[in-house]
Image (tube, helix red, strand yellow):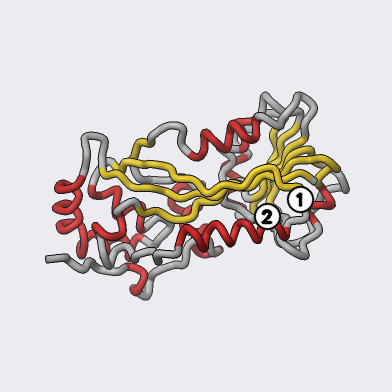
């Protein structure tokens, strides 16, 4: 008999992910955009793949912009492989944390990427975003204005998790439609086509992750949510989640699959 678990998305305290309120919760809880659950990955994980893609187009004189940089940990990865790295984010809490311990070649600013950007024309050789705002949507001009001719734009987006997770924990997680991956591919094909960039690469790829404990199933679901809602979810779900987890976990943890979209284009 399939157990229908409590659905936190129907609770009045549920906060829609990626909204200002959701980011404020994260900044208050941990100071940054950090995944709090414990897990391991099959290599190479998505972040390693994206790091390598960015590194492959950098040079010692490169000026780089990270759009939606969060608390800046990823931005600082390129401190020694580019001349200047700039991270921008609309959340003041994220930027305050990012500025702690930043080297001379890395700078952070509070900037709303949906408004005119405080940079001169042709400022950057490389512009990238990891789950942040894409500056090259149809009709947008700021990305093209600040990216040098021949410059490179890269985007990496997390596009959901499944690999059996949703069928194991119905209610807690909602099923994806059968057309999900096809629709996802079509969405990013359109986005790349509308960007007015020369297409270099577009791919939808899987990342295999192993959640370490039953609690991590709940932590992943409640990422960025209020403590009051988390308490309710734990009370309603933990016992059943523990039973299901223990039945299906491998020696590395519970296997799930994250879907990612990678876009690379040239101005």
In the figure, residue 7 lies in which quadrant? Answer: bottom left
Say whether disc 1 or disc 2 marks the residue closer to the N-terminus.
2
For the residues labelled 1 and 2, the Cα–Cα distance comes to 7 Å
- Give left or right: position of 26 versus 212: right
- Give left or right: position of 249 versus 226: left
Q: Position of residue 168 (x, y in %)?
A: 24, 57
The answer to whether residue 131 is seen in the rendering is yes
Residue depicted at 39% across the width and 62% down the height: 226
Q: Determine which residue is flagged by label 2.
A: 192
Q: Secondary structure at mark 2?
A: helix
**Residue 197, labelled with which disc?**
1
Q: Secondary structure at mark 1?
A: loop
Residue at the limit of the structure toward the left, as seen here? 1
Q: Position of residue 191 (x, y in %)?
A: 66, 59
| 23, 153: nearer the viewer | 153
Residue depicted at 67% across the width and 48% down the height: 67
In the figure, residue 78 lies in which quadrant? Answer: top right
Q: Position of residue 16 (x, y in %)?
A: 47, 67
Residue depicted at 77% across the width and 65% down the height: 139
217 relative to 201, above or below: below
The answer to whether residue 128 is seen in the rendering is no
- Give left or right: position of 162 versus 49: left
Q: Position of residue 86 (x, y in %)?
A: 71, 40
36 relative to 57, above or below: below
| 128, 77: nearer the viewer | 128
Q: Are marks 1 and 2 in contact (CB under 8 Å)?
A: yes
Residue depicted at 67% across the width and 24% down the height: 80
Q: How many marks?
A: 2
29 relative to 101, above or below: below
Quadrant containing the N terminus in the rendered view? bottom left
Crowd around label 1: few <14 · some 14–19 · many ≥20 (10 Å):
some
């Amino acid at each position: 008999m399939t157990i229908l678990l409590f659905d936190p998305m129907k609770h009045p305290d549920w906060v829609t992910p990626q909204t200002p309120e959701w980011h404020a919760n994260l900044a208050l809880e941990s100071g940054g955009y950090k995944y709090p659950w414990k897990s391991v990955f099959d290599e190479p994980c998505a972040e390693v793949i994206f790091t390598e893609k960015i590194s492959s187009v950098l040079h010692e004189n490169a000026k780089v912009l990270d759009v939606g940089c969060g608390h800046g940990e990823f931005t600082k990865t390129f401190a020694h492989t580019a001349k200047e790295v700039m991270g921008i984010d609309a959340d003041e809490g994220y930027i305050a944390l990012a500025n702690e311990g930043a080297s001379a070649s890395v700078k952070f600013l509070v900037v709303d990427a949906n408004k005119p950007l405080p940079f001169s024309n042709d400022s950057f050789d490389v512009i990238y975003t990891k789950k942040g705002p894409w500056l090259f949507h149809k009709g947008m001009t700021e990305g093209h204005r600040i990216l040098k001719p021949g410059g490179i734009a890269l985007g990496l987006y997390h596009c959901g998790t499944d690999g059996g997770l949703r069928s194991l924990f119905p209610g807690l997680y909602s099923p994806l439609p059968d057309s999900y991956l096809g629709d996802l591919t079509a969405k990013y094909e359109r986005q790349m086509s509308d960007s007015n960039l020369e297409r270099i690469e577009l791919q939808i790829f899987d990342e295999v992750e192993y959640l370490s404990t039953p609690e991590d199933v709940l932590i992943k679901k409640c990422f960025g949510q209020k403590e009051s809602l988390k308490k309710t979810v734990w009370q309603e779900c933990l016992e059943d989640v523990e039973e299901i987890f223990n039945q299906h976990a491998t020696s590395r943890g519970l296997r799930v699959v994250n879907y990612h979209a990678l876009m690379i284009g040239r101005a």
